[in-house]
Every structure is written in structure tokens, then in C-alpha cells.
Image (spheres, rainbow, N blue to C red):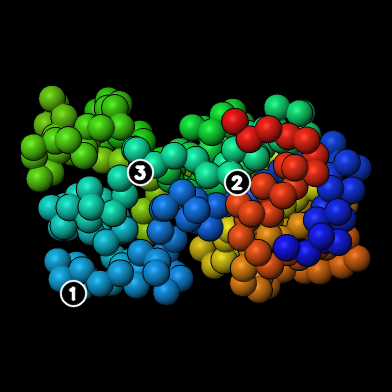
Amino acid sequence: MDDTKLETLKEWMDDSHDIVFFGGAGVSTESGVPDFRSKDGLYNQHDVQFDRYRPEYLLSHSCLMNEPKVYFEFHRQKMDTRRVQPDNAHKYLAALERTGKLKAVVTQNIDGLHQKAGSRVVYEIHGSALRNYCMKCGKAYPPDYIFDSKEAVPHCTCGGVIRPDITLYEESLPEAAVRGAVRSIAQADMLIIGGTSLTVYPAASYIHYFEGKYLVIINRDELNVRMDAHTLVIKDKIGEVFTCLAELQGLRLD
């Protein structure tokens, strides 16, 4: 951990009043949730049952509609985060929100861990695996329903298929979450980008709405992002960075 960069980050945060965090799969890896594109990520896991399919197809609208049994089996095996607990990255952001400095979390994750940690303003631009609804009548179903259903393809009382409220490939992002995310980023005086490769569009493009003073990137890999004098890059695990930062700031990670 680079102590000089950590001190700089603290100083910038002290000078900021409207902080927004934009994060991806790397925020939850320390909770045990695999990311997508790393060597141990979901796209590189070999499973005889699914190896003949492209990973993107298994998470697509086409798969849901054309091969629903395959889609739901993959979802049940790979997307169940109901018993996963927040890591220190989630806990830190919730603590920062309680101070009044952090105004919003914009997340590409569908695991609900930010809310479980205590964050209240969370824009889930790819939806949530903890919400389900009927594709025919719109009736909502609890988080356990799809995972516990005895049907290979779960059905509503009206006969419609019950699906998770997540944004699949080939689908549009949820309008309300996108509006909230873009508005928050545009108003922020500090944007922290963490745990994301910024390769999934259109979500990754939303950071271009940021016109504030301080841009912070916390990621193990290089990102293709504009840099200037007020850009700070920390190449480390985001949970470890936030744990050390919390100690400097005297924040409790409950």
C-alpha cells in the first residue's frame, strides 16, 4: 500500500462534499463473488454442463427466451449470492455515506451487497438478482423464489415465466437507475472508480458525465481513463485500500 497516495486520497476527500462511487465486480471479489473476466472469473470457469455455450450467451436475453432451462440452471448455479456477506469495501462505502460525504453508489453488480452493508443510495444499473418478477403480469417474487423453485423454468400463477430483475445482454438498462447514476456523477465533485474494467457498455460510458475536481481510480489493472493533475491512481485491492483509509479517517466498518 502506497502511504503517500493514501494520504493524498484522504486530503482530497476532506476537501470534497459530493462524492460518488462507481464500482464493478472487483468490489465483491473479496466477499467471494467471482468477477467475470479475470483468470478465475466466471467467464473462465470450466463446467462440462455449460462449456459448449459462450459465457455472454448464458447471460443473454436470447438464452432466456430460446433455452430457458439452460438459462435458469446457469443462474441457479452461478448467480446465487443470497448468503454472501459484504466485504470491507461495501462496509466502508456505507460508513462514508453516513458521514454525509458520499452521495451515491453506482454499481454494475447484481449481488445487493451494498444495501446489505447499509448503503441507502445505490443505483443498480444492471439490476439485482435479489428481485424477481413475472414477465407476463409483472408480479414481484421474493429473492429465494427462483433458486428454490422445483420447476426448471419457474412460472407465475398467471402462467408467465418468472425471471430475475437483472439486465441481460441484448436488454436496455433500467431507466430510473441510469438517470439517477448520470445525475449523481454529473453533480459530484469527486468520483471514485473501483473494481471495474470499464469494458461493459453503455454503463462504462457514464463516467464521462463527471466534470468535478477529483478523479480517483482504485483498480489492480490499468484503465483507459482521461488523466490530469487531479487524477489519483491506486493499483491495489479496493477492500484493502478502504480498510486502511477507514483507519486514517477514524471510520468504523460495522
Which residue carries the number 3 mark?
Answer: 81
Residue drawn where x is 39% and y is 42% of the image: 84
Query: Is the residue under label 2 in contact with that under label 3 (CB below 8 Å)?
Result: no
Residues 58 and 21: in front is 21
Element under label 2? helix
Q: Secondary structure at mark 3?
A: loop
In the rendered image, residue 141, in percent from the top left (x then y), is placed at 27, 27
Residue ID at (22%, 32%): 145
Image mark for residue 52: 1
Q: Looking at the image, can residue 123 be seen?
A: no
Q: Are marks 1 and 2 in contact (CB under 8 Å)?
A: no
Quick check: 116 above or below 194? above
Spatial CA distance of label 3 from label 2 is: 16 Å
Residue at mark 2: 89
Q: Give neighbour class at mark 2: few <14, some 14-19, many 20+ (Cα, 10 Å).
A: many
Asked whether, in this view, residue 129 is left or right of residue 106, the answer is left
Label 1: how many residues lie within 10 Å, few (<14), some (14-19) or many (20+)?
few
Q: Amino acid at mark 2?
A: Ala
Res. 250 mark: none
Mark nearer the N terminus (3 vs 2): 3
Comparing 119 with 166, the one in front is: 119
Q: Which three-letter amino acid code belongs to the residue tagged 3?
A: Thr
Residue 240, horizontal then vertical, whole percent: 64, 54
Q: Position of residue 161 (x, y in %)?
A: 18, 38
